[in-house]
Image (cartoon, rainbow, N blue to C red):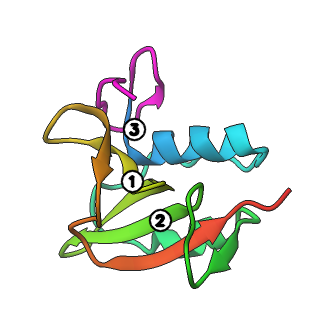
Amino acid sequence: MGARFRFQGRDPAFGLDCVGLAGLAMRAAGCRAAIPDGYALRGGDPAVAIDATGLMRVAAPVPGDLLLFMAGAGQFHLAVMVPGGIVHADAMLRRVVERPGDAPWPLVAAWRWED
């Protein structure tokens, strides 16, 4: 919480984007999959890359799960579900924040790390 936003950021000391935040959260849970970099802001299908990490897709997410949202036309956004909301790297606020309540974007898919 509070780390500044930085596109393709992977270190909380220098900044994180949603992929960096998701990768750090999954690493903290025990997942050792590579955190992607060098991706475009729009386009592609991140669900395919996430499926390849060993995370298990779930239909009913719970706190701790990784969430993939459709934030705009061809633009995806990752967040981690927490009790009562989500934690995500907010480009508008320029930092990692906890957002209470339901996310404002349609949920595309959710994954869980089971060690």
Q: In the structure shown, which secondary structural element does the residue marked by tag 2 occupy?
A: strand
Q: Is residue 68 magenta?
A: no
The image's mark for residue 67 is: 2
| Spot occupied by residue 103 in the image (x, y as percentages of width and height) | 28, 64
**Front: mark 1 or 3:** 1
CB-based contact (under 8 Å), mark 1 and mark 2: yes
| Spot occupied by residue 40 in the image (x, y as percentages of width and height) | 33, 55
> At 45% across and 14% down in the image, what residue appears?
13
> At 18% across and 75% down in the image, what residue appears?
73
- Image quarter where the N terminus lies is top left
- Decide if residue 1 is on the left or right side of residue 48: left
Pointer 3: what residue?
8
Q: How many numbered marks are there?
A: 3
- Sequence order check: which comes first, mark 3 or mark 2? 3
Three-letter code for the amino acid on which mark 3 is drawn: Gln
| Spot occupied by residue 115 in the image (x, y as percentages of width and height) | 86, 56
Q: Give 46 or 109, whichever is nearer the viewer.
A: 109
**Front: mark 1 or 2:** 1
Separation of residues labelled 1 and 3 (CA atoms): 20 Å
Q: Which portion, as a residue range, is magenta?
A: 1-15
Q: Residue reaching furthest top? A: 13
> At 57% across and 85% down in the image, what residue appears?
59
Disc 2 residue crowd, few under 14, some 14–19, many 20+, Cα 10 Å: many
The image's mark for residue 86 is: 1
